[in-house]
Image (spheres, rainbow, N blue to C red):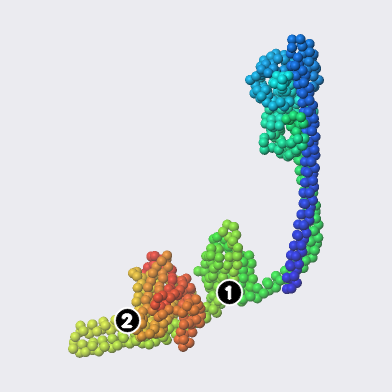
C-alpha cells in the first residue's frame, strides 16, 4: 500500500516539475521572440525617422533657395519702382529684362512678378496687363502692417493677378520712409511640386512646404491635390528656430500611418515636412516578429515532444507495473464479491423501466437458494419472482427519485418462497432519460421471519394486556343473558309468552355482542398473511375492532375516548388486522401515558380522520403530557421506550412503523399542547370499491 501511494505522488511531482520547466522554457523562447520583433520594429521606425528627417531637411533647403530667388526678384522690382521718372524708361526696361531673366533662371520656382503702387494699382507685371489689388485683404494688411520682408500670402482665384498661387510680397518704401507700394513675386505651386517630388522619389514618401499656420503651400505629386488645406492645427507640435521634430501617426497627406518630420525654414514663416509611410516597413517588421514567434513555438514544441518521449519511456515501465497491480487488485475484489452474501449488479435502465444487464457478482447460490447454473444471467431471477413483482416500476422509481427499495418473494427449488430485498441507487444519468443503476439483492427471509415472530409476540402481549378488559366486556353480555333467561323462565310459568319472546330477543342480542368480541379476538390473535394483497379497509371498522379489544382496559383506566371519523369514514388500502394492531398499540400507550397524570387531570383520547391529496390520515391524540424531546427523534427505533423496564421492551412503536411501511403508508409522532399525537397515513381506496369487497376484506 505504501508503494501504491508513493508512485502516484512521485508521478504527480514529476509531471508538475516537467510542466514548470516547459512553461519556463516557453517563457524564455517567447521573450526572445518578442525581443527580436521589438528590435526589428524599432530599427524600422528609426530608419523611417531618419529618412523623414532627411526629406524635411532637403525640403527646407529647397524652400530657402526659392525664398532667396523671391527676395532677389523683389529687390529688382523695388529698383524698377524707384525709377519711374519720365527719363528713367531705359533703366526700367533694363530692370524688366533682368526680372524676365531671373524668372527664367528660377527653374520654374517663380511664375510671375508684379509691382503695385501705394494705391494698389498694378503698374508693371511680367505677364502684362494691369488692374488693382487695393481691395485685397493681403494688400491692405501689408500696407498697414509692420515693415517685415518678405511676407507670404495666398491670392484668390478671381484676383486681378490670375494664376498667382503663392504670392510673396515685399513692402516698397518712399524716400521719406512711407508706403510706396509692393513688389509681389508669385511662386509657381506646380513647379514647386515637381521639384519637391524629386526629393521624395520612393513610394509612400512625401515632401511638402507649409506655412507656419499649418496650411499646405506646395507638396510632391502625392500631396499637390491638398494645396491650401490646413494640415496642422494648434494641438500639433511645431518646431522652433532651426530645431526639427519627428512624430509617428496618421499622415495628414495620405491618411496612412507614417513617420513625420517637421523643420522650420530659416528666413521665412515656412515649415518643411518630410513623410515616410510606415506600412510596408512595419508589415515586414511584424512579419519577422511573427516568424520569430512561430520559431519560438516550434522550438518549444520540439522540447516538449522530447520531454514527453522521455516521460513515455519512463512511464511505460510504471504502467506495466500498475496494470499488473490493478489486475491483481481487480481479481481480489472479484474474489471478495463472489463470497459476499449479497448480489451486486450494475444495469442500464431505460425510461420505460426495462434494464440491460451490465455486471453481476456475489454468492448467488447462498442468496437465492438456487444453483448458479439455474439462474439466468441477463435478467437474474425475474422468472422466479412472484408474478405480482413489478421490477419495471422499481427501476423507474430509481431513475426518478435517485434510489428505491423493494421486498419481493422468490420461488424456491422445494416450491416454497424466500423473501428478497432489492436496493437500487442511481449512479449516473445518461441521455434520452436513461441511467446507470447500481444495486444489491439480499435474502431477508430470516429477517422477515423474525419480524413475524415479533408481530405475533406483540399481539400476544396485547392480548395479555386486554385480558381484564375482555373479561369485563364478556361478563356484561353473559350477565345480561343470565338475567334475561331467569325472567323468561318466570314469564313462561305465568304463561306470558310476549315477555318470554322479548327476553329471548334480548338474549340473542347479547350472544351476538359476545360473539363479535370473540371474533375480533380470534382475528387479532391469528394475524394477517404478509403476502396477502392490499385490500379495502374501513377505518371505522378498524377503530371499532380496536376499541372492542381494548375498550374495557381504557374504561378501567378512566380514559374517555372520542371518535370523529366522518362522515363518511375513509376507506383505505391496507390490511385490517395490522391496522387494528397498530391502533391497539397506540391506545395502550395512550392509556399508560394517562396513568402517569395526577388525579383530576383530564384523561382523554381522541381519534380523528381526514383525507388530503388521496391520503387518509388517522390521528390518535392523548392528554398524557407528551413524549420527551430527547426521545422524539428515536421514538420508532427498536428498544426505545419512555416506560419503565417492567412495562415493555420498546418494540411496540418499531413494529407499528414496520407494519405501516409494509402497507405503503407511514406513521409520525409529534407533541401537542396537552400530550402526544400519532398520525397514521394510508392511501385512499379507489372510488367504486363495492361494499362486498370491503366486507370480504373485513372477513
In the displayed structure, does residue 232 sit left or right of residue 452?
Answer: right
- CA gap, disc 1 to disc 2? 48 Å
In the displayed structure, does residue 536 sit left or right of residue 222?
Answer: left
- Identify whether 359 is placed above or below 452: above
- Residue at position x 80%, y 54% in the image: 302
Q: Can you identify the residue that label 2 sits on? A: 512
Q: Earlier in the sequence, mark 1 or mark 2?
A: 1
Residue 271 locus on image (x, y percent): 74, 32
Please give the label number shown on residue 442.
Answer: 1
The image quarter in which residue 482 lies: bottom left
- Identify whether 107 is placed above or below 380: above
In the displayed structure, does residue 350 sit left or right of residue 622?
Answer: right
Badge 1 crowding class, 10 Å Cα cut-off, few under 14, some 14 to 19, many 20 or more, is many
- Residue at position x 75%, y 70% in the image: 6
Q: Secondary structure at mark 1?
A: strand
The image quarter in which residue 483 lies: bottom left
Return the residue nearer the eye: 254 or 477. Answer: 254
- Mark yes or no: residue 397 visible: yes
Q: Secondary structure at mark 2?
A: helix
- Residue at position x 29%, y 82% in the image: 508
Return the residue nearer the eye: 9 or 385. Answer: 9
- Residue at position x 57%, y 68% in the image: 424
| Circles 1, 2 touching at the beta carbon (< 8 Å) | no
Which one is in front in this view, the residue at disc 1 or the one at disc 2? 1
The N terminus, quarter of image: bottom right
Residue 555 locus on image (x, y percent): 35, 83
Amino acid at each position: 500500500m505504501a508503494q501504491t501511494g508513493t508512485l502516484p505522488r512521485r508521478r504527480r511531482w514529476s509531471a508538475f516539475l516537467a510542466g514548470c520547466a516547459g512553461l519556463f522554457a516557453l517563457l524564455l523562447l517567447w521573450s526572445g521572440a518578442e525581443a527580436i520583433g521589438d528590435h526589428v520594429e524599432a530599427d524600422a521606425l528609426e530608419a523611417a525617422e531618419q529618412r523623414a528627417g532627411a526629406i524635411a531637411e532637403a525640403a527646407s533647403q529647397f524652400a530657402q533657395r526659392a525664398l532667396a530667388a523671391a527676395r532677389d526678384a523683389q529687390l529688382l522690382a523695388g529698383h524698377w519702382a524707384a525709377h519711374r521718372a519720365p527719363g528713367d524708361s531705359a533703366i526700367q526696361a533694363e530692370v524688366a529684362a533682368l526680372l524676365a531673366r531671373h524668372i527664367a533662371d528660377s527653374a520654374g520656382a517663380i511664375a510671375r512678378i508684379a509691382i503695385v503702387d501705394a494705391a494698389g494699382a498694378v503698374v508693371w507685371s511680367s505677364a502684362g496687363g494691369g488692374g488693382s489689388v487695393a481691395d485685397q485683404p493681403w494688400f491692405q494688411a501689408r500696407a498697414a502692417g509692420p515693415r517685415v520682408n518678405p511676407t507670404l500670402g495666398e491670392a484668390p482665384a478671381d484676383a486681378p493677378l490670375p494664376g498667382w498661387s503663392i504670392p510673396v510680397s515685399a513692402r516698397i518704401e518712399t524716400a521719406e520712409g512711407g508706403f510706396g507700394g509692393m513688389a509681389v513675386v508669385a511662386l509657381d505651386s506646380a513647379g514647386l511640386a515637381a521639384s519637391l517630388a524629386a526629393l521624395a522619389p520612393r513610394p509612400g514618401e512625401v515632401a511638402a512646404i507649409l506655412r507656419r499656420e499649418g496650411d499646405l503651400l506646395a507638396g510632391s505629386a502625392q500631396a499637390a491635390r491638398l494645396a491650401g488645406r490646413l494640415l496642422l492645427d494648434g494641438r500639433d507640435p511645431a518646431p522652433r528656430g532651426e530645431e526639427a521634430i519627428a512624430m509617428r501617426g496618421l499622415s495628414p497627406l495620405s491618411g496612412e500611418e507614417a513617420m513625420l518630420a517637421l523643420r522650420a525654414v530659416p528666413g521665412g514663416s515656412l515649415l518643411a515636412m518630410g513623410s515616410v509611410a510606415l506600412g510596408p516597413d512595419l508589415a515586414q517588421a511584424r512579419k519577422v516578429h511573427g516568424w520569430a514567434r512561430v520559431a519560438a513555438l516550434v522550438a518549444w514544441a520540439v522540447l516538449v515532444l522530447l520531454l514527453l518521449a522521455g516521460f513515455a519511456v519512463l512511464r511505460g515501465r510504471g504502467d506495466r507495473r500498475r496494470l499488473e497491480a490493478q489486475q491483481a487488485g481487480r481479481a481480489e475484489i472479484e474474489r471478495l464479491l463472489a463470497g459476499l452474501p449479497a448480489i451486486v449488479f450494475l444495469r442500464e435502465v431505460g425510461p420505460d423501466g426495462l434494464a440491460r444487464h451490465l455486471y453481476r457478482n456475489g454468492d448467488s447460490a447462498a442468496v437465492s437458494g438456487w444453483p448458479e447454473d439455474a439462474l439466468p444471467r441477463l435478467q437474474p431471477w425475474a422468472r422466479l419472482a412472484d408474478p405480482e413483482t413489478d421490477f419495471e416500476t422499481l427501476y423507474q422509481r430509481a431513475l426518478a427519485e435517485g434510489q428505491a427499495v423493494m421486498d419481493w418473494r422468490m420461488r424456491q427449488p422445494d416450491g416454497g418462497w424466500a423473501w428478497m430485498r432489492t436496493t437500487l441507487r442511481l449512479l449516473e444519468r445518461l441521455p434520452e432519460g436513461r441511467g446507470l443503476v447500481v444495486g444489491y439483492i439480499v435474502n431477508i427471509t430470516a429477517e422477515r421471519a423474525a419480524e413475524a415472530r415479533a408481530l405475533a409476540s406483540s399481539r400476544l402481549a396485547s392480548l395479555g394486556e386486554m385480558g381484564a378488559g375482555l373479561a369485563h366486556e364478556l361478563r356484561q353480555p353473559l350477565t345480561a343473558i343470565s338475567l334475561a333467561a331467569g325472567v323468561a323462565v318466570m314469564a313462561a310459568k305465568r304463561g306470558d309468552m310476549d315477555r318470554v319472546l322479548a327476553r329471548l330477543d334480548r338474549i340473542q342480542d347479547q350472544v351476538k355482542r359476545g360473539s363479535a368480541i370473540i371474533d375480533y379476538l380470534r382475528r387479532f390473535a391469528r394475524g394477517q398473511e404478509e403476502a396477502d394483497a392490499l385490500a379495502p379497509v374501513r377505518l371505522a371498522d378498524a377503530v371499532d375492532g380496536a376499541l372492542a379489544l381494548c375498550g374495557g382496559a381504557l374504561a378501567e383506566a378512566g380514559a374517555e375516548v372520542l371518535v370523529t371519523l366522518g362522515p363518511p369514514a375513509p376507506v383505505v388500502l391496507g390490511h385490517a388486522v395490522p391496522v387494528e394492531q397498530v391502533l391497539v398499540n397506540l391506545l395502550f400507550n395512550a392509556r399508560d401515558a394517562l396513568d402517569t397524570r395526577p388525579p383530576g387531570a383530564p384523561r382523554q383520547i381522541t381519534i380523528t380522520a381526514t383525507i388530503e391529496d388521496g391520503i387518509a390520515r388517522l390521528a390518535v391524540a392523548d392528554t398524557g403530557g407528551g413524549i420527551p424531546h430527547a426521545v422524539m427523534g428515536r421514538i420508532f427505533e427498536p428498544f426505545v421506550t419512555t416506560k419503565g423496564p417492567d412495562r415493555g421492551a420498546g418494540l411496540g412503536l418499531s413494529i407499528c412503523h414496520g407494519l405501516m411501511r409494509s402497507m405503503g403508508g407511514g406513521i409520525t409522532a409529534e407533541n401537542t399542547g396537552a400530550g402526544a399525537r400519532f398520525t397514521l397515513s394510508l392511501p385512499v381506496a379507489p372510488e367504486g370499491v363495492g361494499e362486498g369487497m370491503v366486507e370480504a376484506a373485513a372477513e
